[in-house]
Image: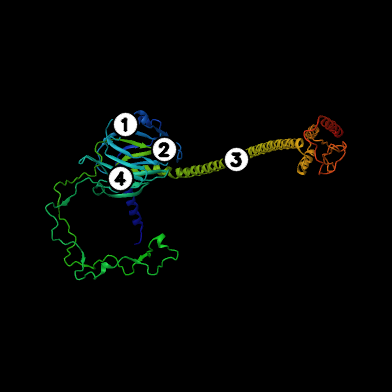
Amino acid sequence: PILTEKSFSNMAGMKSVILALALLAGVDAKVYFKEQFNDEKWESRWVASTFPGKSASDMGAFEWTAGEWYGDENDKGIKTSQDAKHYGLSAMMDKSFTQKKDLVIQYTVKHEQKLDCGGAYIKIASKADQKSFSGDTPYQIMFGPDMCGSTKRTHVIFNYPAKDENLEAKSEIKCETDQKSHLYTLHIKADASYEVFIDEESKQTGKLEEGWDFLLPKEIKDPKESKPEDWVDAKKIADPEEAKPEGYDDIPAQIEDPEAEMPDDWDEEDDGEWEPPMISNPDYKGEWKPTMIDNPDYKGPWEHPLIANPDFKDDKNLFQRCKDCAMIGFELWQVKSGTMFDDIIVTDSLDEAKAFAKETFFAKKDAESEMFDNVEEERKAAEKAEREAAKAAKDAEEEDEEEEREMLAAIAHAGDQRRHLAQVAAAEARAAEESARAERERDRARRRRMEQLETRLRGENLTNEERKSLNELRLDPNFTEFLRLARLVAGSHHAIAYTGAGVSTGPGALLPTVRHRSQPPCQPSLNPPYPPPPPYPPTSTHLHRIHRRAHRCVACMA
């Protein structure tokens, strides 16, 4: 169709009518409660409560703040500020109301602390004692996010007086879990339907009657009816004409491996009787089952006849979820604090709620998101720097520990060396002591041998072996023994003397010899055999001569 000037005029008129209707709707909208927490007097409008059975120390305090990231630093809200605390806070509406048409509950929630366990829901209730407002206080609507562990849901709970129960929605609605602000909206419509929005995005919609167990079922199973005994509901049956093959059950599941052979090193006396390993029987087909065929008598599943529920009572005012509502509040438990609440509105118009969201939530949303991203970047950078510093400190500590270990190892090594040197010194001392003891033993042996020789010299001539031993004694540094022996020999009953111009311990030294008394003093004697010794015992004159010559010989050697 061709648009004429008249058409444009008509379209402009229609827009004016639509705008007027919208304005009238806005004027007609009722706001039962609104709170933005933008003034310091907010505490005069809200009352903190202490739960029955709890003390003031069990209760947490709300902090008035714009939060750690925000779209407007002058736009503030309230935030839980203490971990592992209960929180009770409520405010009265200007006047109580009973829902006559739509009802909209809307507010914003921000979990700055990455909430892991705690509630963030809001309650609408009739007038009650605000000082003791708690989980025991009756309420009519509970709406909002709640998280703990794997449970992350948006509660929509209605109290239904006909059953005197608080009814949870049958279908779970997920909640947001990040650290930014989110707008939660519950819209209860006058046609007994509902819709839940998060950030104005629809999350669930339907009829109240279907979403909650408000009413008893309209129909129930007829208690007078039951399934007939001859009712056939087996769709398949075993083929009656098929029989199990003869000998089917005699086929074993496993048989001996026909290719297996007894090992060559198998010893039946030690290893027992050899048995071949078992393998699956290729002829075994499992438990026999007959072929299933369609049941000619099948009648289909039996359905229990339904009748009208005599106890069913319809509720024409099912949409009316608020009756004499006069109070709004928070009754929470949080393990980790840091949840913010702001921009609350209770109204009978979804458009009014959307307009309020546009002025508040959406006006701040982008700026808050940008600030959050910047804060996150700074936090991540700080955490990275902290990790790097911690790593550097750890590396330095490990390096210091390594140096300390090396130092301790060096000290231990030095200690080992000192102990080794001490052990070596002790070993050397023991060796020296052993050597000294051995030398003493050798000295004692030499003395014993000299004594033996002296004894022999007193009684008989020396043998060649004894002469050799005497010569070895002459080479001993301790010559005093040699002189003592000479003196002893001088006093012997033999007419024996030591000859030689002197005594030398060098290689060319003269061997000591013995001579008969008839030989001249201090003259080398001939090698053995010697003349026979004089008769024993000698006479006194004979002894005197021997002693005199022996003394001359000793004096000669000296």
Question: Which residue bears the numbered disc 3?
Answer: 405
**Between 100 and 520, the one nearer to me in the picture:** 520
Question: Which residue bears the numbered disc 2?
Answer: 338
Q: In this view, does 306 lie above or below 415?
A: below
Question: Which residue bears the numbered disc 1?
Answer: 51
Question: Which residue bears the numbered disc 4?
Answer: 187
Q: Say how many tags the image has.
A: 4
Q: Where is residue 207 in the image (x, y as percent from the top left)?
A: 25, 49
Q: Earlier in the sequence, mark 2 or mark 4?
A: 4
Q: Do the residues labelled 3 and 4 touch (CB within 8 Å)?
A: no
- At label 4, which amino acid type do we have? His
- At label 3, which amino acid type do we have? Arg
Alpha carbon of mark 3 to alpha carbon of mark 4: how far? 71 Å
Q: Relative to 444, is 44 on the left or the right?
A: left
- At label 2, which amino acid type do we have? Gly
Alpha carbon of mark 3 to alpha carbon of mark 1: how far? 59 Å
Q: Where is residue 311 in the image (x, y as percent from the top left)?
A: 15, 46
Alpha carbon of mark 4 to alpha carbon of mark 1: how far? 30 Å
Q: Earlier in the sequence, mark 3 or mark 1?
A: 1
- Label 1 crowd (10 A; few <14 / some 14-19 / many >=20): many
Q: Are marks 2 and 3 in contact (CB under 8 Å)?
A: no
Q: Which SS class for mark 4?
A: strand
Alpha carbon of mark 2 to alpha carbon of mark 4: how far? 27 Å
Of the 4 image quadrants, the one containing the C terminus is top right
Q: Do the residues labelled 2 and 1 touch (CB within 8 Å)?
A: no
Q: Which residue is drawn at 32% across and 35% down?
A: 329
